Amino acid sequence: MSGQILCLSLIASTLACSTAQAERMSVLDNGTIRIGIDLDRGGSITFFAEKEGANTINSRDFGRQIQQSYYGGPQPFGTAHPGWKGWPWNPIGTGDVYDHSSRIVEHSNDGKTLHVKTIPMQWALNNVPGDCTFETWIRLEGRAAHVRCRLNNDRADKTTYPAMSQELPAVYTVGTLYRLFTYDGNTPFTGAPLRQIQNAGPPWAGWKGTENWAALVDDQSRGVGVIHPGVYTYTGGFHDKPGQGGPKDNSTGYMSPVRSEILDPNIHYEYHYDLVLDTLDAIRAYAVAHRVKDSRPDAHFGQDRQHWTYRNATDAGFPTNGELRIKPGRDDPQLIGPEQWWAAESAPKLSIRAAYKTQQRRAQLYWSVPGQGFSEDRRADFEIVADGVYHTYEIDLASRPTYKGTITGLRFDPIPAGAEGDEIRIESISWKPATDR
């Protein structure tokens, strides 16, 4: 363990190193905001405050804080705590339900960037480390903390399990930040009215955060926002008594950007998000300023799946090495793209680079619109060449009468049904034109 290590005592909201009760913390301070990780709790974020302000993060148990948490198969996994029966594989950054802490194996803090590497614990099991590591990098800019996270899997179980929803990240706040706001309408980034999420959980509420953010604020509309550009599914709510409670009390707010991902046994999976400590209006303005500038589909499968997942199909695993190698199931194989919001007229065509070795000769492309899933009236069929050679398939979406307005995602059914020995290789799925090699 190296770098600058500071002690943080949460007494009268001041920094101190003089009490035996002080938690071992590593802190960044830019003169406007401060953020700290707990070196005895796996390096999870347990402190986030204005220069002279109180801590906004709840740490009553090891399942709270701001931390990485991932889900995968099998389900159930191991012998779970009685309160968490049927729980899947779920390493988390702080520790397990039995209060065993995750272990830090690397740490550095040069005053500008904080880095920590952790062996996490399986949340629902008794003192079982995850066969993986977590890494976190943090830096501050103004009233925002930029956080980069990485999961490094090294699982003994070499099975690639189906996709599960991932918390990216999980954020728990103190009870005074009890008003949960977001924008979940169909006209994002236009200044349309926000909505307050009214939910006492768990179970938590779910919604479409179409501006890619959520915030928990106090009665003066000041608090913490989490911004994950490009993620549209959110979950959250408030537990116990609203408007009261500190970092160690039961009352807590929760919010999390969520995305479905396949987590291979050897995957290196990264994401980044921002935490903003400010007014509700300022948090929203930050999200608008840092949004994804071009949300049209443009997936090139050089090293990973680009957030695409499967039903009734599998692939060759991580890394992708330049292409997806799809093994279709016998019945209705589907490739499902990440949620993305774009104007239909901005992407009138879609190009798919694929090589087919199958008995089938027909493929289908579906698209979704706000508030509705995939359906047969939003579908384009096209013929494929099953000679094992790469071809570019250009689908004229603009000619379809139902391809209009806002589009929220794609589903690619490469063939109606698979057979023994079938394989489909895919280099890219993009709104940009492609050419045959």
Image (cartoon, helix red, strand yellow):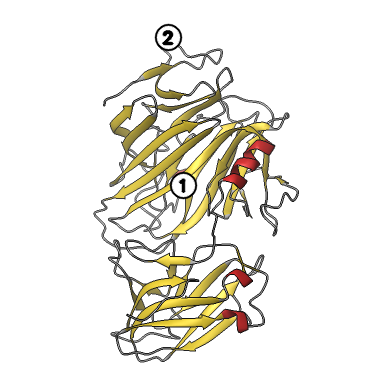
Alpha carbon separation for disc pair 1 and 2:
36 Å
**Residue 238, quarter of picture:** top right
Q: Residue at x 36, y 66 (%)?
A: 301
Q: Is residue 48 above or below residue 329?
A: above
Q: Quadrant of the C terminus?
A: bottom left
In this view, which residue lies farthest toward the right? 193
Between disc 1 and disc 2, the foreground one is 2
Front one among 327 and 408: 408
**Which residue does the image show at 50% across and 29% down from the upper left?**
59
- Of residues 277 and 158, which is closer to you in this image? 277
- Residue 324 position in % (x across, y down): 34, 71
Residue 203 visible, this orientation: no
> In the rendered view of the protein, which quadrant contains the N terminus?
top left
* Residue 305 can be seen, yes or no: yes
Above or below: residue 86 compared with residue 66: below
In-image side of 241 versus 225 (left or right): right
How busy is the neighbourhood of tag 1: few (under 14 within 10 Å), some, or many (20 plus)?
Answer: some
Q: Secondary structure at mark 2?
A: loop
Q: Position of residue 124 (x, y in %)?
A: 41, 44
The residue carrying mark 2 is 19
Residue ID for mark 1? 84
Residue at x 44%, y 54% (from the top left corner): 86
User: On the image, which quarter does residue 134 sit in?
Assistant: top left
Vertical side of 171 occupied by 338: above or below: below
Q: Earlier in the sequence, mark 1 or mark 2?
A: 2
Is 72 rendered above or below residue 30? below
In screen coordinates, is 30 left or right of 222? left
Q: How busy is the neighbourhood of tag 2: few (under 14 within 10 Å), some, or many (20 plus)?
A: few
Q: Amino acid at mark 2?
A: Thr
Horizontal and vertical percent position of residue 198: 71, 45
Label 1 SS: helix
> How far across and down, in percent of the image, does residue 183 sit?
68, 50
